[in-house]
Image (spheres, grey):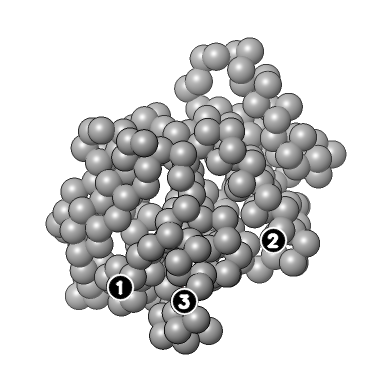
Amino acid sequence: MSVLLKVDNLKAAYGGIHALRGVSLQVEEGEIVSVLGANGAGKSTLLKCISGVMKRTAGTIEFDGKPISNKPHEIVEAGLVQVPEARQIFAKLTVVENLRIGVGNRKDTEQIKKDFDRVYTMFPRLKEREKQYGGLLSGGEQQMLAIARGIMARPKLMMFDEPSLGLAPVIVSQVFEAIKEINAEGTSIMLIEQNANKALKISDHAYIMQTGLVVRHGTGAELLADESLSATYLGD
Ligand SMILES: Nc1ncnc2c1ncn2[C@@H]1O[C@H](COP(=O)(O)OP(=O)(O)OP(=O)(O)O)[C@@H](O)[C@H]1O
Ligand SMILES: [Mg+2]
């Protein structure tokens, strides 16, 4: 398997706050990789640097064998899409209009039609609400829409920042099922989650962050078996 995303010695700061102090990690093609850690560990900052919305102060990021662009839209075009923490769907656009934004500059009309069918099969609720404004969807429905919009870009790598946050348990399970399905269809996944056990169960590899550094990594199964982890690093 080849390495799809390689992050090396990444540093980033908010003024004097050193949120990332030298993070290295990688995602191989086809993998689900989780990044876990307590509040404030730097997980969202890591994703923001990778997706180009925040500037790093040091380190390198390679995606698909090349240094990553520093322009967010070029990163999306290269096949890396982030489903952000706060969902950031467009409240004044309908469900289908939000999905069209995900399509971006794609020209493969036939495949785009199939992808609409695919996300509507994955999330029937979105089909029912096709003409409804994004802002009127429930929290869970907005999360489904954010994931579906990401899928419409046909990315090589999809990064999720706490997709289960604030959702009812049954919806959380649907979101995890969707992530597994997206992965099974060939998209690699980077997943940030507070729900450590659920994340580790579906992960090939996982990294644990603490105050801006990776402090542990291993396979999902290895970390799942380590009972000392949650008390020491995960803050629960
Ligand atoms: N916009 C900002 N301005 C200043 N400091 C920030 C900003 N965003 C994050 N930080 C700080 O950077 C550090 C890392 O934050 P980050 O949001 O990356 O953590 P996180 O691991 O995603 O936490 P959580 O699990 O709570 O989402 C924290 O100490 C946080 O207070
Ligand atoms: Mg965060």
Residue identified by numbered label 3: 226
Residue 164 place in picture, x, y as percent: 62, 62
Q: Any atom of ligand 1 within 8 Å of the CB at mark 2?
A: no
Q: Nearer the viewer, residue 119 or 101?
A: 119
Q: Which secondary structure lies at badge 1? A: strand
Residue identified by numbered label 1: 215
| Residue at mark 1 to residue at mark 2: CA–CA distance | 27 Å
Q: Any atom of ligand 1 within 8 Å of the CB at mark 1?
A: no
Task: Tell me, yes or no, whether the two marked residues, 1 and 2, touch with CB atoms within 8 Å.
Answer: no
Classify mark 1: residues with Cα within 10 Å, few (<14), some (14-19) or many (20+).
few
Q: Which secondary structure lies at badge 3? A: loop
**In the rendered image of this protein, does residue 34 appear above or below residue 103?**
below
Amino acid at the residue labelled 1 = Val
Q: Name the residue furthest right.
A: 128
Q: Residue at x 45, y 34 (%)?
A: 156
Instruction: Give the mark, 1 or 3, whose residue is nearer the N terminus.
Output: 1
Q: Which image quarter is the N terminus in? A: top left
Residue 211, quarter of the rendered image:
bottom left
Amino acid at the residue labelled 3 = Asp
Instruction: Give the mark, 1 or 2, whose residue is nearer the N terminus.
Output: 2
**In the rendered image of this protein, does residue 194 appear above or below residue 26?**
below
Q: Which secondary structure lies at badge 2? A: helix
**In the rendered image of this protein, does residue 199 appear above or below residue 18?**
above
Residue identified by numbered label 2: 172
